[in-house]
Image (tube, helix red, strand yellow):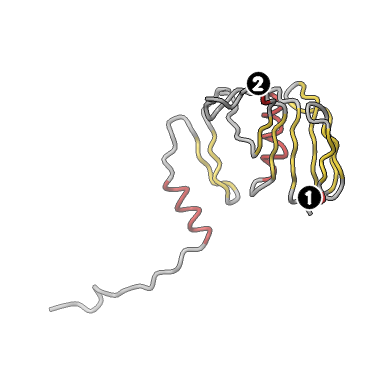
Amino acid sequence: MSDDHDMTAMPHEPFTPADVVLEGFLALETPEGFRAELIEGEIVVTPPPGAPRDHVIPDGTFAPQARRLYRGAEPWMPCAGVAMVLEVTSSRPNADREVKRRCYARGGIPLYLLVDRDTSTVTLFTDAESGDYRELHAVPFGKTLSLPEPFGFDLETADFL
């Protein structure tokens, strides 16, 4: 004899985006010593205490050809000899505006060019000292931005509009 109540099927609710993030968070296998938290919908992983060197990948890296920095370079190359790095804001614009800016300044990269799609501006950061850039020059898309040597030309931003 069978019991009709044993085989009752419940309709499965579709996953919401919040459910997907929570499932991903709960499935994380965080390395020993790291701490993973889910804060306001973002998964934040904090490394153990210690100050490892920054490992940042710019959207663009510019260096004099004579330096031959890229020939046989590892994916994580040193900053020495790099003239300028470029970032274009993406889904985490504050990382480009703040965190990466300080990383590049700590690395001693003389020029940092930020194309900010959210604010429609192009900003050149210069004069790296004490872990940040002390000078910046920002122009709205459509205006000209002067790039100092070793570039020495005006960057036209009309095409950024």
Q: Indicate which disc, 2 or 1, sits on the residue closer to the N terminus.
A: 2
Quadrant placement of the C terminus: bottom right
In the drawing, does residue 31 fall left or right of residue 126?
left
Mark 1: secondary structure: loop
Q: Amino acid at mark 1?
A: Thr
Query: Please, which residue is most extreme toward the front here?
Result: 66
Q: Residue at x 69, y 33 (%)?
A: 85
Question: How many neighbours does mark 2 have within 10 angstroms: few (below 14), some (14-19), or many (20 or more)?
Answer: few
* Residue 90 rendering spot, x and y as whole percentages: 66, 48
Up-down: is 9 above or below 77? below
- Residue position for label 2: 67
Question: How many neighbours does mark 1 have within 10 angstroms: few (below 14), some (14-19), or many (20 or more)?
Answer: few
* Residue 38 rendering spot, x and y as whole percentages: 54, 46
- Residue position for label 1: 119
Q: Amino acid at mark 2?
A: Arg
Mark 2: secondary structure: helix
